[in-house]
Amino acid sequence: MKKLVLLLLLAGSSLAQTREDSVIIRKIYNETLTNGQGYEWLRYLCKQVGPRLSGSEGAKKAVVYTQQLMQKQGFDRVFLQDVKVPHWVRGKKEEAYIHVGKQKISVPIAALGGSIATSAKGVEAEVIEVKSFQQLRELGKEKVKGKIVFFNRPMDPTKLNTFEAYGSAVEQRANGASEAGNLGAVGAIVRSVSTVQDDFPHTGSMRYATGAPLIPTAAISTNAANLLSDKLKESPTLTFYFRQNCETLPDADSHNVVGEIKGSEFPDEIIVVGGHLDSWDLAEGAHDDGAGCVQSIEVLRVLKAIGYKPKRTIRAVMFMNEENGLRGGVKYADLAKQNNEKHIAAVESDNGGFTPKGFGVVGRPDQKAKIQTWKELLAPYSLHEIGPGGGGADIGPLAQSGTVLFGYKPDSQRYFDVHHAPNDNFENVNKRELDLGSASMAAIIYLLDKYGI
Amino acid sequence: MKKLVLLLLLAGSSLAQTREDSVIIRKIYNETLTNGQGYEWLRYLCKQVGPRLSGSEGAKKAVVYTQQLMQKQGFDRVFLQDVKVPHWVRGKKEEAYIHVGKQKISVPIAALGGSIATSAKGVEAEVIEVKSFQQLRELGKEKVKGKIVFFNRPMDPTKLNTFEAYGSAVEQRANGASEAGNLGAVGAIVRSVSTVQDDFPHTGSMRYATGAPLIPTAAISTNAANLLSDKLKESPTLTFYFRQNCETLPDADSHNVVGEIKGSEFPDEIIVVGGHLDSWDLAEGAHDDGAGCVQSIEVLRVLKAIGYKPKRTIRAVMFMNEENGLRGGVKYADLAKQNNEKHIAAVESDNGGFTPKGFGVVGRPDQKAKIQTWKELLAPYSLHEIGPGGGGADIGPLAQSGTVLFGYKPDSQRYFDVHHAPNDNFENVNKRELDLGSASMAAIIYLLDKYGI
């Protein structure tokens, strides 16, 4: 009987708890949807700051802007962390054409981040089109030597989650140059890893494998990739010309930008919410990842605005250099270790500012089980997918200290239309979708703060 | 023991069934995402046909285009149903300004569908701003007489589902003129029922209540509504001028367009999938509801393409005149009754071509329970919300004969950014989102066909 009473009491208190939680989560959404600031902050970051590749003037401006922005919000502490970052520059705009007989057809390309330049005259050669590294290796040195390899495997349109399709196509961009170089190719052209047919080349990082010859490599728009493939069917001995002027300069000084609200009960337990401040040089970096940055700052603003006093310390972190080095994420985790900071959880938004679907979770089974008990609090906000999927690149290095990672998971259908391309601009972000993301992140931060993990 | 064996056999066969279903549903998605045609059909409907308000040349062209399109798909039967439709025309573009002292500030308005014109000189009067009919009635005749009433209640941004927010704001557009006219107002200006702040007026239908005086009414863009409200605070006696030239002509001849695949086992049981072919005159009607039309045709194409032979008769229906009369939907149901047709289920897509979330269902509890057993087949496709929400306006009249109604429910965040406004254009539709909608509709049609309801 006593047991029964205890159980009923517990059940009653847990129900009251749930009711209180749902009221606070509703407040979070109301505040964000009514007074959301993230969209205007993003407008500034896109239009006044602009592209912000690591080492660039834009990246410097972005550090200053977000630092001042968080100071203005009245967070308890705003500070910078020094980070040395790679400094790759595109230089003069690339030039490329398909050369068939006397015809020269200009096509849009963009050097891949980390690539070397061509010679000043450019490079011109016959083209070998392949869909996989396997196919390339089977062709062998004899057929590849002196040629430009054209990696033309599209993203698989049948994957419902476009990140899966990206994952299985992006090796062409990341490692294609070395695979081609190892067989004697003089250049590598990679089909843009994109979900649409258009004229934008999508850049992104590549790296040369140890010992592989350094050959220049660039992305070509999906329309131009189709054109090149068609032309090759008609004229297998056509040539492709490209010239690019990119360069890797010495590492540059940069920063992570951190703002925090001090915890009232467990100030030494830290919860991070972040995005990355750097972007590619060709775009405003609106979805990738201006969205994640302003959402993270918005999470802290919203918690303050509704009068919620966190028990634990909540930090908004603008990581530097996710795109071509991850130095900011690594540095953040190093400093956390060095300073004996206890990071219980970290939430990253780096999948675009689209309508929320859920969170990927990386943690122990018991932690994941605890998170599942929050599902019904989140379901009214269409956060149905809690669990599957990863955390985020920048927060990844925290995992080794046992931090539970959350990757904010918005709808993925439009992300790779704009990813790393000039159309990743402010106009392609929807205010309500962005705000709903901020609110979803604030809701999970609230639950993590209240219940720990 | 026999019972146990039977149960195991049944369980086994049901498992095998589910496996077969999930294979076919996967095929549906693969076909749609790989070879989807809806997007190009929509391009044609938006760019070559264009706006298609009932009675317009565009509406005529749309009938011919979709009829020929379905004939080309080789459906078993394609036919027209005659429908008499209202024929309202906007006439010459409206003109409007705020008149403060010597200053005239031009503002964008659009006459509401069904409104009368102003006199040729236009109407100018002082403005009474209200947020509700209640507030207007409390002001009473004395204060309203001779004025222009300005209905300025925005959509509630805190509603997660924007259709709810629309539902609680749209009465201003539908009935505002009569509410104002009954108190002696000379015109009614309505804040666009929109989720964004911009310069597009959003039109839509209105109707005069029986016995209410006929006064001209128009929508004003959200930016201009804010401006007018601000100016009124400074200068309560400012005047507003507008002129519009719209007119209701005699009813016109038009058509529903129907294409069908004959059922192999129960040809007399009909399942409808449809959208409405008419749009407002200011827009291409891409999301509203070109999307629903091409998705419906795509459903039949996809089922054919994967070699699925339906047991029941599946019909794609392009309803005419949803926007300002619903005559097509009413006529379709009337003919169904007249011809003793048995419509077991109807699916409508009229909420935009966005990422799928689920289906609203209108039916008996036992029918709803049966549909719930399909949930796990649909969850892998992010169709988590099966049940809540309504059917669709055009299929509504079928309900009285016991047809189960399904309203396709995509993500609602962006719909009212463009609804009934000039930016409801092809460029604002995403191919993958549109295709996923078609596939979701084909999946539910497949289950309805296979298992009945």
Image: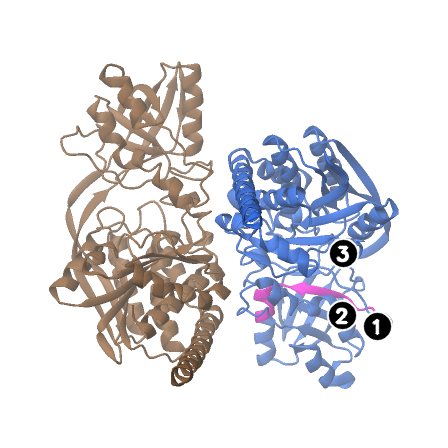
Chain colours: A blue, B brown
Mark 1 Cα-neighbour bin, 10 Å: few <14, some 14–19, many ≥20: some
Q: Could you say where residue B296 lies in the image, as x and y percent from the top left?
A: 34, 64
Q: What residue type is labelled 3?
A: Ala
Q: Do the residues labelled 2 and 3 touch (CB within 8 Å)?
A: no
Of the residues tagged 2 and 3, which is closer to the observer?
Answer: 3
Quarter of the image that includes the N terminus of chain B: bottom left
Q: Residue beneath label 2, please?
A: A177
Per the rendered image, the range of residues in magenta is A213-226
Residue A181, how many percent across, how many down? 79, 74
- Residue at coordinates 79% horizontally, 64% vertically from top-left? A207
Q: Which mark, by number, is residue A399? A: 3
In-front residue for pair B10/A8: A8
Q: Is mark 1 on a helix, strand or loop?
A: loop
**Residue placed most toward the observer, B64 or A69:** A69
Q: Do the residues labelled 1 and 2 touch (CB within 8 Å)?
A: yes
In the rendered image, residue A116, in percent from the top left (x then y), is placed at 80, 62
Q: Which of marks 1 and 2 is nearer the N terminus?
A: 2
Q: How crowded is mark 2: few (under 14 residues within 10 Å), some or many (20 or more)?
A: many
Please tell me whether mark 2 sits on a helix, a strand or a loop: helix
> Is A216 covered by the magenta stretch?
yes
